[in-house]
Image: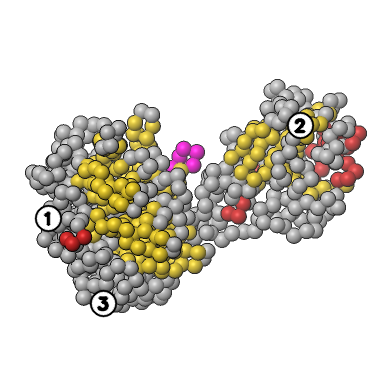
């Protein structure tokens, strides 16, 4: 979603969208860090006295034929006979009685001088395309309820995440309290709405805040849309009735369902209401606040019931064509800076049903738009595909205004698809939901032309390139079925996409259960997709921990860099707070939310360093990178370096980089720090298995190779300074 690790997609649900009747109407267990290998003398291992025969990393000024008999013998084929190594790579690692320390690649104690040459089979340790930091890509869920659940609260209709903070809207909540931390048990304002803020610390979730509008009234539906970015929350109330944003107008209630948005900010650990937002030109039933998004000092608010024409918000000539409004903050003051309309605005388009922001663009969905164009940049004037839906992108211009940048349709646009029902954006990517798309395809990139699964739903990923927007991926559920409404909600964060399908009917519980069991109608599900090496794939099938028919899990979804979350608007639990009794179904349609913890995402890197004087550039990493759960396979290229070498060795050290001139070249990695040595035959890569352990993310190490040539000795390569990542 943004360069900030605390930002969220800002996607939200619309009260005007017919798919959203209620409002208008994952860390996995962590293994220990690299464990030291058992130094017992056993089958498959050979022990050598390090001090006598293998001190070359600290004494590179000696002739390896004399000082390093193990290397000399290996070059004559002895290595192939030790532990049956043959042509496979070997690991040379130090045995030590010391316990492992977190993050250490290898335990080394200079007084212990035993080497163990141990077989490594790359096939045996090959990992999945992306580490899951455990058996599941998301951890077990936490069951979240409001502090005072009531029937028909619809808690979970809207949900947003940033870092370890989760915000949940309950637009049907009935308390007449105002402001922050009021009395939630006063049920005298039916459907006034409320918002609940949760925070995760380690394994524990706590309910931190209970937010109400400053002018709470019945039927305001405060909490129908929510968004969060760091220390700022924005809440939509599309049923609020005041005429404008003047402080003395908040209680007038003269424009029914015009709508409002509220901004809350955390200051010194305390949430306060910072702003009350209204459009400069609004009228009855605009439903301003049906969708909201925030990015930094910018807020985007959708009003799908607005009736204006492009450039003239005072005209009510195009009923329910819809609009969106950009607000920006200067210090503590928010002001409207733009009024956005589709260039092809038509009555009933519901433009503004969904909105999203990234650091550059504003995105607005119009799921009831009826253009017959397909793909990006088609003809917007033809209305031959009723309710096919569209998304519009906008950019700020040099004059301080905003202009339409692109008109997006799906690659298989059809009537009734409702493309644009949900949107989410991050870093030049956009995901769009089309919950009534009819293809029977499954997974990623399937046959989109088969319309045999009515209202199964789909999602589409677009990426911005120097040539404009292009569709990057077509996403379907792994268990596509008629009427699942996959794409009702979407969230995007970095290389992850989460898609909700509220009508999916499996009775499976938790993560990656049996998705073929359709015994719980409308229980709902969510699907996590991840992008690796340019390809998208489904990595998790997510269900509530105790699913029931009609719960609608996945009605809303949210992603941060640490959390996956989903709302179940019709869940019936009567327990309050965190991790209560999920079998208590005493409050019909009270609603629930579920929080899952994600492994951290970190890009693995391998940075070349040649030193001074520069060593030959011969050690390479690509396409392999040091990713947890995978085998990293760096290699020495002998095209121009040591072409007659008979042995390659790789030092992996967790010490700081060094630059020490030696006859064999410049030593670039510290051999006195904790380290490990790997051996490979020239022409073969080294095989370095990296455990599936989240604790290793961000671990830095220095790697450098040396090649041994009979009659020449050792020659050093460049170093690769690595950072262990998850992708």
Residue 480 visible at all: no
Neighbourhood count class around disc 2 (C-alpha, 10 Å): few under 14, some 14–19, many 20 upward: many
Query: Going from the N terminus, do you reach mark 1 or mark 2 first?
Result: 1
Q: Main secondary structure of the magenta part?
A: strand
Numbered range of the magenta stretch? 532-537
Q: Which mark is residue 666?
A: 2
- Residue drawn at (34%, 53%) of the image: 332
Question: Which element carries disc 1, helix, strand or loop?
Answer: loop
Q: Tag 2's secondary structure?
A: strand
- What residue would you read off at disc 1? 284
Left of 22 or right of it: where is 77?
Answer: right
Image coords of residue 644 (percent x, y):
77, 24
Mark 1 / mark 3, whichever is N-terminal: 3
- Residue 665 in sight in this render: yes
Mark 1 vs 3: CB contact within 8 A: no
Mark 1: give few (<14), some (14-19) or many (20+) Cα within 10 Å: many
Percent coordinates x, y for residue 538 in the rendering? 43, 48
**Residue at 25%, 44% in the rendered image:** 337
Give me the C-alpha separation between circle 2 and circle 3: 75 Å
User: Circles 2 and 3: CB distance less than 8 Å?
Assistant: no
Residue picked out by circle 3: 186
Cα distance between the residues tagged 1 and 3: 28 Å
């Amino acid at each position: 979603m943004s360069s900030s690790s605390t930002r969220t997609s800002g996607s939200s649900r619309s009260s005007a969208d017919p798919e959203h009747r209620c409002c208008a109407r994952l860390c996995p267990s962590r293994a220990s860090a690299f464990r030291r290998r058992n130094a017992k003398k056993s089958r498959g291992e050979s022990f050598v006295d390090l001090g006598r025969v293998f001190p070359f990393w600290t004494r590179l000024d000696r002739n390896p034929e004399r000082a390093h008999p193990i290397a000399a013998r290996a070059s004559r084929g002895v290595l192939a006979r030790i532990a049956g190594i043959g042509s496979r790579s070997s690991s040379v690692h130090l045995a030590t009685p010391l316990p492992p320390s977190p993050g250490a690649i290898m335990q080394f104690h200079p007084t212990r001088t035993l080497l163990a040459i141990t077989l490594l089979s790359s096939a045996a340790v090959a990992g999945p395309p992306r580490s899951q930091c455990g058996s599941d890509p998301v951890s077990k869920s936490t069951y979240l309820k409001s502090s005072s659940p009531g029937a028909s609260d619809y808690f979970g209709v809207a949900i947003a995440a940033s870092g370890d903070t989760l915000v949940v809207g309950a637009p049907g909540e009935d308390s007449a309290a105002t402001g922050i931390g009021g009395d939630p048990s006063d049920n005298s304002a039916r459907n006034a709405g409320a918002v609940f803020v949760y925070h995760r610390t380690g394994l524990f979730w706590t309910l931190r805040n209970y937010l109400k509008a400053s002018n709470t009234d019945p039927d305001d539906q405060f909490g129908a849309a929510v968004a969060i970015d760091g220390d700022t929350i924005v809440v939509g109330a599309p049923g609020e009735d005041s005429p404008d944003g003047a402080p003395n107008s908040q209680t007038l209630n003269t424009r029914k369902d015009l709508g409002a948005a509220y901004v809350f900010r955390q200051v010194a650990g305390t949430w306060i209401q910072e702003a009350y937002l209204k459009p400069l030109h609004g009228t009855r039933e605009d439903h301003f606040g049906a969708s909201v998004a925030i990015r930094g000092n910018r807020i985007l608010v959708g009003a799908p019931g607005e009736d204006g024409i492009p450039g003239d918000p005072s005209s009510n000539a195009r009923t329910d064509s819809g609009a969106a409004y950009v607000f920006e903050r200067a210090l503590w003051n928010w002001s409207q800076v733009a009024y956005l309309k589709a260039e092809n605005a038509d009555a009933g388009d519901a433009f503004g049903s969904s909105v999203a922001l990234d650091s550059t663009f504003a995105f607005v969905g119009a799921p009831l738009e009826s253009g017959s164009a397909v793909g990006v940049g088609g003809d917007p004037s033809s209305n031959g595909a009723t309710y096919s839906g569209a998304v519009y992108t906008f950019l700020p211009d040099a004059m301080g205004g905003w202009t339409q940048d692109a008109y997006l349709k799906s690659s298989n646009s059809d009537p009734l698809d409702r493309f644009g029902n949900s949107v989410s954006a991050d870093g030049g990517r956009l995901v769009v939901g089309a919950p009534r798309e009819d293809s029977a395809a499954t997974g990623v990139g399937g046959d989109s032309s088969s319309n045999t699964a009515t209202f199964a739903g789909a999602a589409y990923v677009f990426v911005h390139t120097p040539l404009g927007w292009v569709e990057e991926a077509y996403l379907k559920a792994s268990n596509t079925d008629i009427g699942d409404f996959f794409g009702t909600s979407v969230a995007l964060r970095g290389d992850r996409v989460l898609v909700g399908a509220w009508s999916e009917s499996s009775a499976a519980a938790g993560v990656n259960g049996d998705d073929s069991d359709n015994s719980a109608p409308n229980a709902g599900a969510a699907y996590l997709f991840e992008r690796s090496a340019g390809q998208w794939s489904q990595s998790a099938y997510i269900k509530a921990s105790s699913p029931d028919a009609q719960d609608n899990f996945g009605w809303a979804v949210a992603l941060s860099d640490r959390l996956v979350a989903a709302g179940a608007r019709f869940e019936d639990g009567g327990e309050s707070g965190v991790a209560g009794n999920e079998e208590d179904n005493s409050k019909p349609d009270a609603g629930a939310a579920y929080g899952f913890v994600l492994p951290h995402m970190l890009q693995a890197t391998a940075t070349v360093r040649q030193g001074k004087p520069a060593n030959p550039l011969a050690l390479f990493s690509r396409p392999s990178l040091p990713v947890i759960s995978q085998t990293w396979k760096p290699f020495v290229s002998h095209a121009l370096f040591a072409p007659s070498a008979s042995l390659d060795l790789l030092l992996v050290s967790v010490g700081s980089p060094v630059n020490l001139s030696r006859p064999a070249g410049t030593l670039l990695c510290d051999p006195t720090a904790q380290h490990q040595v790997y051996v490979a035959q020239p022409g073969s890569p080294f095989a370095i298995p990296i455990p599936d352990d989240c604790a290793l993310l961000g671990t830095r190490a220095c790697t450098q190779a040396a090649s041994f040539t009979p009659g020449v000795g050792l020659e050093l390569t460049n170093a690769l300074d690595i950072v262990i990542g998850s992708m």
